Amino acid sequence: MTSHDRPMESVLETIGQTPLVRIQDGVEDVRIYAKLESFNPGASVKDRIGRYMLERMLERGDVPAGGTVIEPTAGNTGIGLAIAAQQLGLDAIFVVPERFSQEKQQLMDALGAEIINTPTEDGMGGAIERAHELAEELDDAVVPQQFSNPLNAEAHYATTGPEIYETLDGEVGAVVAGCGTAGTLMGIARHALEQDDRTHVAAVEPEGSLYGEIVGEDRDEDEYKIEGIGTHDPSTNELFDPELVDDVYPVADRDAHDELVRLAREEGHLVASSAGAASVAAKRVARKIAIGDIETPHDTVVTIFPDSSERYLSKGIYRSFEEWSS
C-alpha cells in the first residue's frame, strides 16, 4: 500500500499503491488476489483516473487553468475528479442519474462540486447528453468523458497494471475485472499482455448487461442491481476492446450479493456489489484454470475490488437479498 515514510504535499500523492490481498475462498491450487482500491483517498479506483486525466488534460491544454470539468458519472468518478479538480484549481460539475448512491453525491458536494441529476429512465446516455449541453453553455468547460477518453485506460496501464506485476513479481496468470467504462480492465489488460500474451483476460458484467454482445455472445437485456459495472448501451462504452478480452462473465445480482456478504463475514472485506461480482467471476476463472479449461502462464488470478460498501449502506447492501434488490 502507499508508503507513509515521508510527508506529502497533497492528497493526490496518496493515490495508488493500494494493497493486493489474497482471497481465501476458492480452489486450492490457484491463488486469487484482489487489489483493494478503497485504500485510495476518495475510497475508490476512480481516484486514479481523476488525477491522471486532469493532470494530462491540463498539460495538453484541453482544459485551461481555472476552467471547469463537467462529467456524467454514477458517483465514484465524480469523487475522484472532484478531489483532483480541487487540488489542481479547477471547478467541477457532475451529471448523475437519480438512482445512484446518495452517499456518493453528498461526498461530491462536500468536495466543492456541483451535482445535477438526470432522470433514472434516461440512463447514463441521458447524463452524457446533458453534460455536453452544459459544456457548450459555459466558457472554458470540458467533458473528460470517462466512457470514451483513452486517458481513462491509460491511467491503469501506467499505474494499476505495473503495481500488480511488481507486487506479484510478474507471476500473473489471469486478470478479471468488472467493466463499466471498461477503462480499468483495458488498461490493466494492455499492460498484462505486453508482459505475457498468454495471460487470460476476463471482463465481468451483471446479468442483464449487454457487454457480451460486443464479443458475439447472446445476452438478454434486463435491469440489474449491481452498481458501477455493466451497460445497456454498448455504443457508449467506446473503450472496450474485444481484441484484448478472452471471455465476458455475467454475474447474477443474487450471486454478487451473496459474495459481498461472505467477503465481509469471512474475510473482513467491506466491499460493494461490483466487488462481489468480480470475486464470483475470479473464482470461476480460477476453477477453470485448476481443471485445465484455461491455460495461463501462472496459477494466479488478479481482480479489482473498486470501492467500499460504506457508499451503499443507505441502500441496505447488507440486508437480505430481497430487501437490497427491491
Image (tube, rainbow, N blue to C red):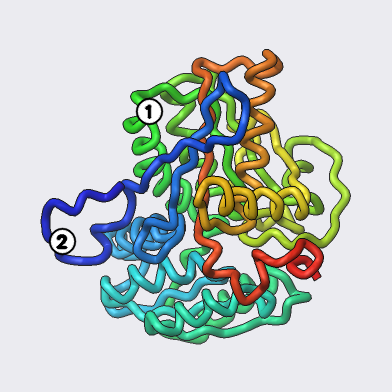
Which residue is pictured at 30% across the width and 64% down the height? Answer: 58
Residue 174 found in image quarter: top right
Q: Total of numbered circles in the picture?
A: 2
The disc labelled 2 sits on which kind of residue?
A: Met
Which residue is pictured at 37% across the width and 28% down the height? Answer: 168
How many residues crowd mark 1 within 10 Å: few (<14), some (14–19), many (20+)? Answer: some
* Numbered badge on residue 8: 2
How many residues crowd mark 2 within 10 Å: few (<14), some (14–19), many (20+)? Answer: few
Above or below 310: residue 120: below
**Which residue position is annotated with label 1?**
168
Q: Quadrant of the C terminus?
A: bottom right
Return the x and y of residue 187 as percentages of the image width and height: 47, 41
Gap between marks 2 and 1 measured at Cα: 27 Å
Above or below 185: residue 293: above
Return the x and y of residue 82 as percentages of the image width and height: 39, 73
The disc labelled 1 sits on which kind of residue?
A: Leu
Q: Secondary structure at mark 2?
A: loop
Residue 202 found in image quarter: top right
Choose between 302 and 79: the one closer to the eye: 302
Above or below 1: residue 228: below
Q: Secondary structure at mark 1?
A: loop
- Does the image show residue 210? no
Above or below 191: residue 59: below
Most distant residue in the front direction: 266
